[in-house]
Each structure stands twice: as C-alpha cells, then as structure tokens.
Image (cartoon, rainbow, N blue to C red):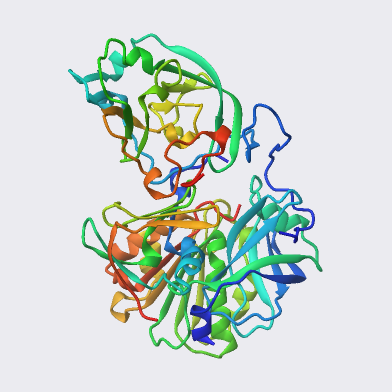
Amino acid sequence: MARTAVLGRLIWQFGTVAELVQETPKVASLILDVPGWTGHLAGQHVDVRLTADDGYQAQRSYSIASPPEDSRLAITVERLDDGEVSPYLVGEVRTGDKVELRGPIGGYFVWRGDDERPVLLVAGGSGVVPLMAMIRHRAANHLKTPTRLLYSSRSYEDIIYRAELDRLASAGDGLTVAHTLTRMQPAGWTGYARRLDSAMLAEVAWPKAQAPIVYVCGPTPMVENAASLLVEMGFDPASVKTERFGATGG
Amino acid sequence: MSFISRGFRGKRRDTASSSRLPPGQYVVNDFPVLSAGPTPRIPVAEWSFVIEGEIDKPRSWTWDEFRKLPTEQVTKDIHCVTKWSKFDTGWTGVSVDTLMEGVDTAAEFVIEFSYGGYTTNLPLDDVTGGKAWVAFEFDGQPLHPEHGGPARMLVPHLYFWKSAKWIRGLRLVNEDHPGFWETNGYHNYGDPWREQRYWGD
Amino acid sequence: MTAQQSDMKLDGNAIAGLLREIFSMEMTTAEGTCANCGRVHVVGEVVVYLNAPGAVVRCPSCDHVQMKIVQGRGKYWIDMSGVRCLEFSI
C-alpha cells in the first residue's frame, strides 16, 4: 500500500460526494466515495480540478483529512470569501455531485506511523488538516507514539475538529493538544492567547534531546516563523518538515 | 473535456468576443499579481535606471532625475499569457522614446533587466515609436511593489511578460538574447493577436 | 484579495503533482544540489512560486532559480540548470 502511494501514474478520477460536514462556520469536509482509490499515506494531498461549462478550469490542492484506514476519502476545505474554488466546494457542492481529483500526492510531508520518534505537530488554521490525518491514523491503529499538537486558530469557533481532538486527547494514550487563539478568546479560556512564539513552543515542544519529528503546516508566514523558531531552539532542520499553504485553497 | 462541475462558474471573466480581446483571452476586473520570486523592495533613494550596451555613452537616471523627465498618461489594454486581459488600464510613465532621445545605436535588440534578476528580450523597434514606457504610476497611484514598483516596463502590444517589473534598465544588443521565459518555452516575440504564447506558435 | 508577498511563496509540496506528471514518480523526497551555492535540499523544501506563467523553483538557501517548468500546447519545457544533481531512489 505504501509503495503504490508513491509510485504509479497519476490519473484524474471522480469522487462522488457522499456527505458534507460543516466543521466550523467557514470550513467544511467533503466525504467522497472514490472508486478505485489506491490508498494513501497520512499527510498526502489530492489535486481537485473544476471545469465550467465554457471549458474554463481551475485546480487546487487539498490535504486529505481521512486516515488511510477509512474507506471514504475526506478533504477539509476552508472557504475564502474572495476565493475561486473554495466557495464552490464549501457552499455550492451537494451530496451526489462528482468532483474530479487525482492523487494521492506527496512523499515528503507524510507520517507512516512506523517511526519511533515522538511527533510534534504545529498547525495554523486549515494547516491542521494533514496533521489530523496523521492523528486519525495513529488512533485507528492504536499507536502509542508520543504526539503533541500545537494548534493556532483565530477563535474558538474556528477550531476545526475541535470535539474530536478533545476526545482523542483525553484518551490518555500519549496524545496531547494545546490550542492558541490569536484573535478572540471565550470567557474562562485557559489556553494560549497569542501567536506562536518561542516561549510557547518551548513549553509545548518535546525537549530537543528527544529528537522528535516535527510537521508544521499552515499559511506561509506562520510556517516560516514556526520552523525558524524550532531551528533556533536547536531542533535538527532535517527533522522539521513544512508544508506551506500560502493563501491558496482559494 | 466533457465533464462539467455542476454549478461551477469560476472567477468573474468575460469571454464575449470583442475586437479588443485577442484570441484565447478573457477579461478580468481585478489585477492579478504574478511573480517568479520574492518581491524586490527598492527604496527610491537607491533606484536607478540605465541604458547600456551598444551605446556610445551609457545613460542613467536616479529617481529624482527620472521624475523630472516629461511624463505621459496612457490608457492601454494589457494581455497576460496566462489568458487574462484587462481593458483600459491607466498608467503614468516616461516614454522610452524620451529616454532614447539622441541615442545613436546600431543595435537591433534590447534586453529589459530587472531588480531580482528577471530579463525579457524584444526588438528595439518594439520599444520605440510610441510603443513603450517606463511606468511608475498605475491608476494615478504610485506603482505598488507587487505590481512592479517603483517602476516597470509597459509594452502593451505584446504579452505582458514582455513588460518587466522592477525594471533596472535596458541593454541594447546586436544579437537577440532570449530572456527568463523565452529560454524556457515562451515565444520569443509574444504577439497576443497572433496568439504567440509558446515556442512553435 | 491583495496578494501579499508571502502568499506567493510555497514549497515543493505545491508542485508534487506536477513533478509526478513529469517524472512518473513521487519527487518531493528527492535531494537536489543547488548549482549556485552547492547546498542540498529535499525537493519538498524548495521555494516554489506558482503564480507565474510557469512554476519557478528557487533554492531555499541562496534563492537561485533552480527550475522553471512551463506547460502549454500539450508540452512541458523544463529548465533544471539550477540543480547540479538530483538524487532519488525508485
């Protein structure tokens, strides 16, 4: 399964929307049935291609949110108000619609689960999506890999997969989740309330002596900030993997 | 392509045929930003524009000197090889004819070269005779760095990759010298009316 | 949306699909030696600009243009002169 996920012809195929899940006011997951899907690794993405009736096409990449264990493929999309593709996927698409996609794509930003190193996941906004696939893969296989997620969101309502993360983090099997809310915090909030900085990372991250593998994903400025802080803190750059979303997904 | 994504329209674009729209283009109302690298940030105090190469005496202007030259306000349609066109764009700039006044050269070609390393090539004829400007304002406002400011080339009769952003100067040369995109698949001349996008077109 | 400079800057993950079309295999774990500064970077980490008439890949260490990829008329044009050597396993 792992080998077919990194080799082989990439073909365009169709997924049928089986379910739509509103995750937050601006974010929804599309749960797709994709006949002939060859499987994937947590962290990989798909390219989605939309075609208008005059032949105009737009293509975007979306991280796969579902773990390899799920029979259906899930992508989670943040709707950008002035975007071109995301307002279609989150707003127009209905169950039963077909979506053209290809994948799985990516071999660098993946976590197979067979690595013994502790895992640090650093997410900004919709950057949590590929990291959630990793967390779900870990849960589906009852892995005990020590894993910490530091997740930055604008507000409490914007935390994607909030309930599921709470549930998984309270299982006591070695997953901890720390949130920071950068714009607004609810009354009684006890989590972090500012942008990622070195003090926060120092509190949440594994000691560098534990040599964790680190995945950072989100908007480009957030990823570059976090990655350079981690390297400054002494983490081996070769073990800090990054995926920048830019302002894409629009 | 027979599959259509139900209900997908895509960004606002107008493909209605018009004598103003070159083949294969659509009209947009925003002003897309394309970039091959980090946006150069050039303070005007450090900016200069040069004309060099096949010229007796290279010329150069500091920003202050450049801004003392006669300017023109022009309104032009622009066409990007990525298929968007924008009608009636307003620019303020110095005509290349002004910059080339009194220059005696046998060069037939020119290379536009930019801060950040971008280059593009054209026949000298295509930047003279009222066809090209060094523009420093768009829509009456100082040209934003993401659109090529402090100054960019404006050569609207060709695809817009021939209008180099963050222009640093023009090099007059005897032999044509394909630039950043022309060496890698894009047409050497780039006439949108003959749809000269790629090699072999 | 005003495109901010940082919005334009992506990484090798953003061209994973395109490289897969060209090489018929996953390339983001390949290692490229920069022809300009000699540093080695995993393709997943290279700096990528996609908002252009083609994909432009730059060295994360020295910003030198490593690759340019243009697609059109059913063809690809690839300049890899900024990569001295590409190492990968099949």
Residue under the point 75% across and 53% down: B8
Quick one: A236 or A200, which is closer to the camera? A236
Q: Tell whether C7 sits left or right of A85.
A: left
| Residue A217 in view | no
Q: Position of residue A72 (x, y in %)?
A: 69, 79
Q: Please tell me whether residue B79 is drawn above or below residue A51 in the rendered image.
A: above
| Residue B162 in view | yes
Q: Position of residue A160 (x, y in %)?
A: 62, 65
Q: Tell whether B154 sits left or right of A59.
A: left
Considering every residue shown, the one lying at the far left of the view is B57
Q: Tell whether A52 sits left or right of C36.
A: right
Quick one: A129 or B108, which is closer to the camera? B108
Split into 4 quadrants, where in the image is the N terminus of chain B? bottom right
Q: Please tell me whether residue B141 is drawn above or below residue B160 in the rendered image.
A: above
Q: Position of residue B116 (x, y in %)?
A: 32, 40
Q: Position of residue A56 (x, y in %)?
A: 68, 49
Residue under the point 30% across and 65% down: A231
Residue under the point 53% across and 63% down: A127
Q: Please tell me whether residue B65 is drawn above or below residue B181 in the rendered image.
A: above
Quick one: A64 or C52, which is closer to the camera? C52
Residue under the point 54% across and 67% down: A128
